[in-house]
Each structure stands twice: as C-alpha cells, then as structure tokens.
Amino acid sequence: MPKLTAEISSLRKIERDGDFFHAADLAYKLLNEHCHGPDGKVIPEKVDHACRKIAYRLIRAVLNCRAVERARSLYHTEYRLHERFDNFKMRSLGARLEKEGALLSSGKEQRHLLAEAAHAYEGVYDDFTQERGYSAINVATLNLLRGEEALAGQWARKALAECDRTQPGGAEAEYYTAATRAEAALILDEPALLEAELKRARDVQLKQSTTRVTTYRQLKLICDHRNLDANEILSEVRLPDILFYVGHIISPPGKPGRFPADNEAAVGEEIRRRLEGQSVSAAYGSLAAGSDILFAEACLDNKINLHAVLPFSQDDFVEASVAPSGGNWVERFHACVARCSSTTTEGSSVDYATKDAFLNDEVLFNYGSRYAMGVAMLQAGHLMANARLVAVFDGRCGSEYGTGNVVEFWQDRGLSVDIIGLPGTTEPKRHYPVPRQETDLPERKPKAVLFGDVVGFSETREQDIPRFHQKFLKPLFEALEPYQKEVRCLNSWGDAIYVVFNQAVDAARYGLQIQQIIKELNFVPEGKDGPLSMRLAIHHGPVFDSIDGFHRSPSCFGVHVTQAARIEPITPPGAVYVTEAMAAELELCNESDIACEFVGPISSAKGYGDMLLYVLQPQHEEQVLSEIQPTTAQ
C-alpha cells in the first residue's frame, strides 16, 4: 500500500502540472495493475477506495483532453463511479460530464443538454452542504449559455452568498472562492468586482496549475457568449506558456561553426535570463550538444517540466549530435536524461519520435522536430495556453532540417518567436561513420500509413462476395481517386486495405470519408442481421521507400508500417484511430476540418506495447453559444 500511495501522489502531481496525457497514461497503468484481471477487464470487487481515487483522476485527465465520450464510458460503465451517489466529488464529476457533453452539442439539442447539466448541478447543490458556491455558479453559467439570463443572475447571486458564508481554509479554497466570485461578477456584469477577484485569484500561490485551466475555460465560455475579448479580460488567470526550444549545435573548442564554443557562457546566461523572465509551464525540444542541452539544464533548474524528444535511438543520437562537439557534452546529456527520469523532477520525461536506428537518414531530424512541435501544440491547445518558440539562431538558413527551418515555420504560422542571436561563422559538416550512400539501404521518408479491415467479413457467404466487391469496396476505391497524386503505394486483399500517403492530412480526410461512405452504404450481406463496418488506423512515421520486387511498383515498409497494422485490430468498428505522431502532424497542418480526440494509452495487437491513441473526427463548424437568444424573464 505505501507504494500505491506514492504512485497516487505522483499521479496527482502530474495532473496538477497540467500534463493530462501523462496523467492519463499513469492512471491507466495503475488501474490495470490494481483493478483489472488478466483479460484486462475491471474486476468489480477490486474497485476499492484507492482504485476509485485513481479512476476519478483518470476521468478528470481524460476530460481535460476533451475526450468526453471516453470519460463518460469510464465513469458510468467501467468504474461505475455514478453509483457513489453519496460522494460529493463523484457526483460533481458526473455533473461536469453532463456539462462537457452539452458544450460539444449544438442547436436545440444543446439547449436541452445545458438544461440537463444545470439540473445535475442543482442536485449537487441540494444534496451537499460543502462547496455549494461551486455548484451554484455552474448552474448560473449553464443557464446563461442556454439563454436564461434572469435565472442565471439569480444563481450567480446565490453563489456570491455562499462565498460570503464560507471562510476559505487554505490557498486552494481561497482561489476557488475568488474564481467563483469572478465568474458571478462576469455573469452579473459587475466589472469592478470582476477585476478585483481575478487579481485576488492571480495572487494565490497554487500547486495545481490545472485549476487555472478550468477557471479560464469556464470564464471564456461567458466571454464568448457575450462577444467579449477573453484574452484581454482574463489575462490574470491564463495558464503559463508552452515552450518549444531549438538552436544550433555547438562547435568543438577552437573550431569554427554557427555556435562557436567561446559563446557557450553568454548563450547559457541569456537562455536562463529569458526563462526567468517568462511564465512557462512546460518545455519541449531535443538534447543535442549546445543550445538544446543549455535549454534543458535551465528548464530543469527552474523547475519547468521538460519533455525532451529524441529523433531516433539514444546511442545513435549521442554519436551524431552530442559527441562530435567534444568537451563534457556527453556527460551533460546523460545527466539531463537522468534528471528527467528522477522522482525529484516528476512531470519531466525523455520521449522518442522513433526508437529506430539513425542509419544516417537526416530526414529523421526533421521528423523528430515536427513530432515534438506537434505534441507541444497539442498540449498548449488542451491547456488553452500560448505556444511559443525560443531559438538560438544566427539568422542564416542552412541545413534543410535545421534551426532556420523551424524558425520560418513558426513565423509563417504567426506564432510567438524569441531569437537569441549568435555571431556564427561557417556551417559545420556532420561526419557519420558510414556515408548514407554506402549503406545500400532505401531512403526513409515520413509517410501516413492507413490500414483498414472489414468487421465480420469472414462470415460473408461465398456467393455474396462479388456483390461485396462491387457494392462495398468499389465506392471506397473510387473515393481514393482524387488523392492519387499523394498516394505512394496501396494494396488490398480480401476485405483489407492498405494505403500510404505522402501527406498526413490526405490520409486523415480519406479515412473519415471511408467511414462516411460505409455508413451511407448500409451494406448488409446475405444472412446477416446488420450492415458491415470497418476499422481504420493511421500512423505517421518514417518508412523505407522502395520498389516491390514482385509487383515492380512503389512499396513502403519498416517498423512504422507494422505499428499502423497493430493499431487497426484494437480500433472500434466505424472509428478511425490515429497515433500521437499522426495527431501531432495534423496539429502542425492546422486544418480546420479535422479534429483528434484523445483516447489514451491502449494495448496494441500481438504484444506491440501500449500506444497513446486518438480518435479522428470531422470538425464541423459549431453553433456559437452567443447565438442563443435570452429568454424574457417572466
């Protein structure tokens, strides 16, 4: 039990820091270890007080990743927390689920669901005397969003009265009181009270940064409903930035380069000055000698959660990007890795874009950089925080996969870019043990790999298979025609399809299109009760790009093709599951018609290990809440 207590404490720390992805990952692992049987299913009699605490944290983390349906399933079906009717936290979590579901709907359905969510919070308010201001203010906001202005005002005043009756005990209670009063002031249109309470909330020293995320989201709903500038009004409670760092590799002592060794002390000091003067909650980047390691050391020293992302295997990375700089950079690299794994720096991590060997494929540097950038932006989106870049850069574009490329990408997106200048000289050449052209291996290129398989096809009668090919598969192949220029290779066998796309966004759109076509086809084989469905999975990663020896046509192969294949069998019928790498690449593509909703770490087929997965969804233009007209008070 002491070990479990410590693990739950670690889970709370990660959640407090706003790292919802890692919090969900740890919670799943703890529940699998303590509450599940060998088949992976929940054993009801094992769901004790400790397991309910973990499940509660898991659902909160999943909700903060905007995966409402997954959270609802965990709450009602898997861990049955709704049965804890006498527990304030469990009941409040249930009401929040209703609220989040309502906010994802639109039109008349949304108005109805907002009313249902308000009713759920009213029940919590009536049944529990603790934290009644919290329940009351949620009832107020939900009524406001559904157009019941007068009713919203009544509940906002109830919330203020509850705050006046309660004497805050501790920093967290003081913060919640200030946040509740600020929300009531915003509803009641009392700007002086709003300003005072937001400043009061800002000044409370909180361990839990996610509390500010929840506050910002809630107040932003009201601002959006009333067409107010949330960035200006709510600046006091906005969460710190998410940082992505990049920079030149330092040259060996006495050698020329874009980051001369003589500049190490000045650059290191400037990095620390920039970090100390900014509000940053987490940082993402790599661990190459020079700029990267200087950033990493400064982040760890300033207790900023560091997520170092290596583009390929650690030994190869050290050989290619750390050891050539000489000095003590290899020792400093390993020290950073050790600190990221230490219990004293919970919330930091070392991750890999791919754990494959380098094989001198320089494209992996770009793949790793884009992967880290995408994950950083995903995290910023979930925290409603700003993502910004800090770069140690001499101002000259050099390598196709270098610092200048990253700076240009951020500038083109209109994102915040902070440059630490260098008096660089020449571009140093990398020296690899075996030149790429002498390895006799095909080139690796990042591609989006899609696998699909029809559920229940094996039960289709022989005489119905021609109709299946003509009526079911043919429309799927025809839908691929507009993408032909971006398809590198494709194949089908029986009821399965395999397509490799040059661009992630094309794979995502085609996957969603397939599911829509199948839904409209409603194809029912002879002798079956229901229509056929398909599982689809997509991964984005560097694959070997070559020619198939049998077909004499383009072919892609490698571990990343296998990774995509291992996801397909665990995908629910009718869904499109994508890996975190695919979700990160889509985030960088910045396409408004595609959304990725976090699912969590799922065990893949054939023992391939756990993978963080997302479900792909079409992003429809949602009705703005402010369009709901207020109801005239009676």
Image (spheres, grey):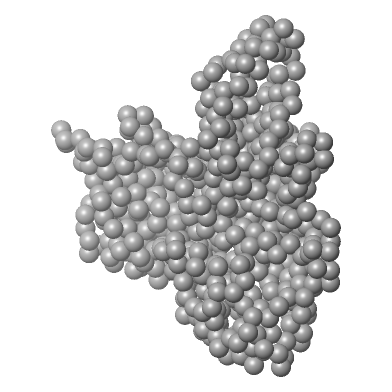
- Residue shown at the point (70%, 68%) measured from the top left: 340
Position of residue 435 in the picture relative to residue 309 (left or right): right
Using the rendered image of the protein, determine whether residue 503 is visible from the camera's viewpoint: yes
Tell me if residue 309 comes above or below residue 249 in the rendering. above
Front-lying residue, 241 or 207 = 241
Tell me if residue 562 comes above or below residue 569 in the rendering. below
Front-lying residue, 555 or 111 = 555
Quadrant containing the C terminus in the rendered view: top left
Percent across and percent down for residue 208 are: 52, 62
Q: Quadrant of residue 46?
A: top right
Using the rendered image of the protein, determine whether residue 538 is visible from the camera's viewpoint: no
Tell me if residue 378 comes above or below residue 123 in the rendering. below
- Residue shown at the point (73%, 49%) measured from the top left: 545
Percent across and percent down for residue 163 are: 34, 55
- Residue shown at the point (28%, 58%) measured from the top left: 229
Percent across and percent down for residue 31 are: 70, 44
Q: Quadrant of residue 81?
A: top right
Position of residue 212 in the picture relative to residue 235 (left or right): right
Tell me if residue 125 comes above or below residue 339 in the rendering. above
